[in-house]
Image (cartoon, helix red, strand yellow):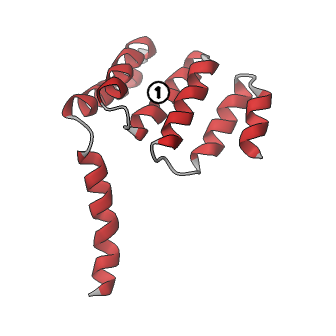
């Protein structure tokens, strides 16, 4: 019984977190992913902005927004988006990705503070 609960509780958390986002936020997130797959990063940014406006606490959308800004070379927006992703629940492993992106875009002091 306890073993079943230890498997089911994390699944319940994941399902609840996914359902917490508005349908519009989820749709815009998926549209952003499709736009990136088609190489249209500016359009993806429009969709992902609508997603986080619709559900500000959508951590996965903030993370994807950071990735888009990284690709576009928009370091300030990238740093803000990674911070929001962590604030709204992305795991600490995101710091590695965030630090890498900060280094690639020349944000050396910020990358150093993330490592500390």
Mark 1 nearby-residue class (10 Å; few <14, some 14–19, many ≥20): many
Residue found 63% across the figure and 44% down from its top = 95
Residue furthest to the top: 42
Q: Nearer the viewer, residue 116 or 43?
A: 116
8 versus 71 height, above or below: below
31 versus 90 height, above or below: above
Asked which secondary structure carries label 1, the reply is helix
96 versus 55 height, above or below: below
Task: Find residue 98 and report its image quarter.
Answer: top right
| Picture quarter with the N terminus | bottom left
Residue furthest to the left: 23
Looking at the picture, how far across and down is residue 46, in whole percent?
A: 37, 15
Q: Nearer the viewer, residue 113 or 60?
A: 113
Looking at the picture, how far across and down is residue 22, in whole percent?
A: 23, 35
Q: Nearer the viewer, residue 21 or 104?
A: 21
Residue found 59% across the figure and 50% down from its top = 93
Tally of numbered discs: 1
Residue found 56% across the figure and 27% down from its top = 80
On the rendered structure, is 16 left or right of 65? Answer: left
On the rendered structure, is 6 left or right of 71? Answer: left
On the rendered structure, is 103 left or right of 17? Answer: right
Looking at the picture, how far across and down is residue 24, in whole percent?
A: 22, 28
Task: Find residue 15 and report its image quarter.
Answer: bottom left
Residue found 69% across the figure and 37% down from its top = 99
Q: Which residue is mark 1?
A: 65
Looking at the picture, how far across and down is residue 59, in whole percent?
A: 42, 40
């Amino acid at each position: 019984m306890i073993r079943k609960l230890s498997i089911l509780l994390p699944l319940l958390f994941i399902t609840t977190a996914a359902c917490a986002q508005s349908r519009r936020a989820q749709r815009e997130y998926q549209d952003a992913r499709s736009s990136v797959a088609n190489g249209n990063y500016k359009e993806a940014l429009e969709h992902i902005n609508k997603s986080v406006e619709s559900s500000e606490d959508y951590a996965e959308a903030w993370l994807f927004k950071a990735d888009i800004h990284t690709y576009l070379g928009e370091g300030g927006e990238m740093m803000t988006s990674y911070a929001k992703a962590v604030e709204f629940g992305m795991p600490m492993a995101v710091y590695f990705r965030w630090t890498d992106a900060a280094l690639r875009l020349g944000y050396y002091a910020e990358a150093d503070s993330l490592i500390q």
